[in-house]
Amino acid sequence: MRIGTTVCGLTLAAGLAAAGTGAVAWSLEEAAKPYAGTTVDVVFLLRPGYEAAEAMLPEFEEKTGIKVNIVKHPYENALGEQVRDFVAGGDFDIALIDLVWIGNFAENGWIVPIEKFTSNPDLADPELDLDDFFPLVLNAFGGWGDTIYGLPFDNYSGLLFYNECMLKDAGFDRPPETWQEVMDVYGPALTKDGKYAYALQSKRNETQSADSFARFLWPFGGSFLDENFRSNLLSPESQAGLNFRQELMKFMPEGIVSYDHAETVNALAQGDVAFITEWSAFYSTLKNPETSKIADCLKIAPEPKGPAGRKPALGGFSLAVASQADEKEQAAAWLFIQWVTSKENALEYLERGGVPARQSVYQMPGVAEKFDFVPALVESWQEGVPEFRPRFAEWPEITEIVQEWGTKMMLGEVSVEEGARIIGEQMEAVLEKAGYYSGKKPLIQ
Amino acid sequence: MAAAPGTRRAAVIQIALMAAVILFCVFPFYWMVTTSLKTQVLALESPPVWVFEPTLANYRSVLTEDGVGRTLVNSLIVAVSTTALAIALGLPAAYALARFEFRGKKDLWFWFITNRMISPIVLALPLFLIVRKLGMLDSKLTLILIYLTFNLPIVIWICTDQFRSIPVELDEAASLEGASHWRVFRSICLPLAMPGVAVSAIFAFIFSWNELMFALVLTRNAAKTAPAMAVSFMEGYNLPYGKIMATSTLIVIPVLIFALIASRHLVRGLTMGAVK
Amino acid sequence: MSIRARRRTILGFLSPAVLALALIGIAPLLYAFWTSLHFFNLTKLRHVEFIGLENYGTVLGDPVFWEAMGRTFTLLLIALPLQIALGLGIALILHRPGLGFLKTLTRLSLVLPMATTYAVVGLLGQVMFNLKYGVVNQLIGFLGIAPVNWIGDPLNAFAMIIFWDVWQWTPFVALVLLAGLATVPGEVEEAAQLETRNWWTVLRHVQLPFLIPGLVAVLILRTADTLKLFDMVFTLTRGGPGSATELISLMIQRVGFRAFDQGLASAQAIILLIITIILAQAYIRLFYKEV
């Protein structure tokens, strides 16, 4: 096999290769010497994990002489920017990959498998330790098929953020454990006096498919596709989940279909809703008294369970070397990716507001106490579903369909069943065109 | 002479209506500027507060940390250059359309105008791919040239009408004295067409300054314009209303100053073919 | 002057503009046409394939496309009459004699909305029309009206788009019509006003003929600009909630720039362009005697 297929194999290869070079210890400074003065271009989002990395950057640039040129884009533009750049053979040397983009980037050959670098003793840090990444996260964010392309960088799991004070006032001494509890007990008790129990980000953006639609499929036993890649949205389980979401809207603020992450996080931060299900990345925003009125009341738990279990939302970004970069830029890009996601830097990254995917950092003494989201996060990453949203190349087209009809469903412009039927039909048309049904394409998601 | 009661009532109504128009036009600006002077927490206060201690923190932050200043300079360079270029190329064409008879004139005029109507959506991606091939991405020159596609038509449209409103006898008199068409155009017609030139310049400047789609697709860093910058604050994860409004204010102020200076020409130049 | 010299003069005057537009404008248009005949998905450039007019067939039979088109024309049909009625009213007020200072002030204020960056209008709309923090709900609250969910409700969101379009473009209409009124010969107008006190009669029989060219220009420009309208809606609602404010240009942007189906998006864009040209031709044939 040309490419190391398992994470273990890779580490082993890297380890052996490193051992082969003799006694000289590997150091970033040494490794970077040939690439001093190289500039690497990368897209960053305007989110806490990126601010954290940006703040750490001077240290890297000083050590290596490599310049990292950051181009900032809002999430909703980041895919388009990169696709256009890669299509045109542009400047980006590092790809920032949301887990749902990886099939697309990998199939187009825009990114380089990490094996190229991990097998090069001059570039591979002996401390790379791929096994230290949460396996689910490494495979879902960085892997496609049997190949690892990217290292997890900005890592999310869906968590339940709740306002403990509001819950206490209503007589609850613990957060809801199941969605049914939310519907039957917490919802009615907390929706009063202009306050609402829950806000679910549902704007017609990626958030509609990722945070709203998919969140109510999986815990109820539903999914986007069945094993033959036909729509599974009309299955009793999927329908139950989507109907549940529809009914739950009575405990959400008016106009929830115009809520993106910002509005949702803000609703909790302002004390307007009692709990939200949001990405771990928003912890720093909600914990900061300058941006949150409820910083002292903030508590975090894993997402509520559905009939099929927890299956929390999974999302996040990896960094991969772009194949359009020349050899020097590729090496420099790799050194940066390896450094910013390293075990060694995980704690600093965490302290500056990022969420690393390194298991070791969460076992360090004091970390779980200082960052109250850690236990819930670690638990979530044991139970996540990698194909929470299918990660194949067709996702950009499919998410547009889900966004359109998912919001129409919530607005009551179509019934849940009718909406699911339309999404299913249009989704199958996209997959048909892509060649999944004729056997031209393997059924990987 | 004392005004008749009817006239006085009419005057009062007239004043009231004008005040309403002013309020309608100005209030959103007032709100934009005051929001830009609020802290983040204050900007999200419900209900909104009207009286507060203003802060310039948002301006400091967008100008120093986010580099909005540089994008404003880019916008200015692009808008001024493309306006000047559109006037330089458009005026002779407008003069020819106004003064000469030739076959296909109507179609030519219509083709010019059509360029103004093409949705940028049609051209954005093809242009991206072409510009990339030419190695001219993220360049102010690229924007300047592309903005000609909607500025030239506006200049030609407005100025053709202006030239037509100048009595042709003036040209003829000059021609009899031996002046070339070029001289007639430059020394006789152009000065008389200044209101039209001014108005088309205002519009070309406004359209270029405000353009978003091409700026978003074709620039990245070096040539990024201010509107493209303002939109980039719209990340889903927080709502920096104060910063967004500060950037918006900075974007709007230069174009407003320009428009206000030139506005005395607006009425005389905007006849859009009404003059026979 | 000989015919040849004359021709050379005309060419000399016209060619710079013609060449510039041809070089910059036609190439991308041809490229767009070429992609519209292909399966051309940016993320699947290995499978570019000539498919003839299939994309056009898809567009013509796509209800989503026609719904977006319908929405766009609904906006035009509501906003434009409002703009013309209000614009005409403002122009007539400003055309009346007297009150020089206030009139200058009004005229200056009219420039503000027109000059405002369209994307900023949308951002401002988000701030002012927010359900909770928005000043609009506070103001209508003073009138005893309950807070309105502007951005999250389909009908309200559409109303909000209309509001901003009217806010931004009524001044333009007003200024064009004011310019038209200024071209009415003073003596004709005065004579008419001596004959009747009815302003409507004066408007209808004396002033209107002078306003027609301006109105046609407004009609052409507003139609074209509504079909192009993108920035303000994009920053305000992004076409939502649901598809309530997804105008045609937002829809094309979604297909081309988010689903990356550039072939289909090009076909949509070219059909849009054809519709625009037909409309503009019709306006000009019907009303415009110029050129």
Image (cartoon, coloured by chain):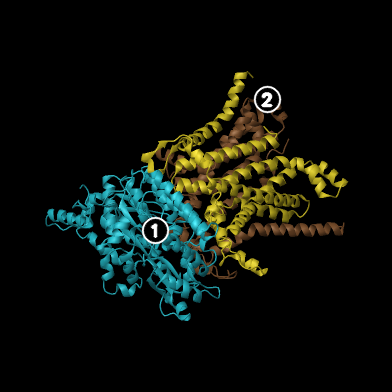
Chain colours: A cyan, B brown, C yellow
Q: Position of residue C248 (x, y in %)?
A: 55, 47
Q: Residues within 10 Å of mark 1 (few under 14, many from 20)?
A: many
Residue B159 lies in quadrant: top right
Mark seen at residue A166: none
Q: On the rendered image, what quadrant is the C terminus of chain C found in?
A: top right
Q: Position of residue C175 (x, y in %)?
A: 68, 48
Q: Amino acid at mark 2?
A: Ser
Chain to which mark 1 belongs: A
From the image, tell me which residue sits under label 1: A223
Q: Is residue B235 visible?
A: no
Q: Position of residue C178 (x, y in %)?
A: 72, 47
Name above or below for residue A154 compared with residue C175. Answer: below
Q: Position of residue A381 (x, y in %)?
A: 32, 65
Q: Residues within 10 Å of mark 2 (few under 14, many from 20)?
A: some
Q: Nearer the viewer, residue A92 or C50?
A: C50
Q: Indicate left or right for A18 with B98 as reference.
A: left
Chain to which mark 2 belongs: B
Q: On the rendered image, what quadrant is the N terminus of chain C found in?
A: top right
**Count of numbered circles in the view:** 2
Question: Share a chain, discs 1 and 2?
Answer: no
Q: Nearer the viewer, residue B252 or B64?
A: B252
Mark 1 falls on what kind of element?
loop
Q: Indicate left or right for A169 with C136 as reference.
A: left
From the image, tell me which residue sits under label 2: B175
Q: Amino acid at mark 1?
A: Ser
Q: Is residue A77 visible?
A: yes
- Mark pair 1, 2: CA separation: 81 Å
* Viewer-nearest of discs 1 and 2: 1
Q: Residue at x 84, y 56 (%)?
A: B7
Mark 2 falls on what kind of element?
helix
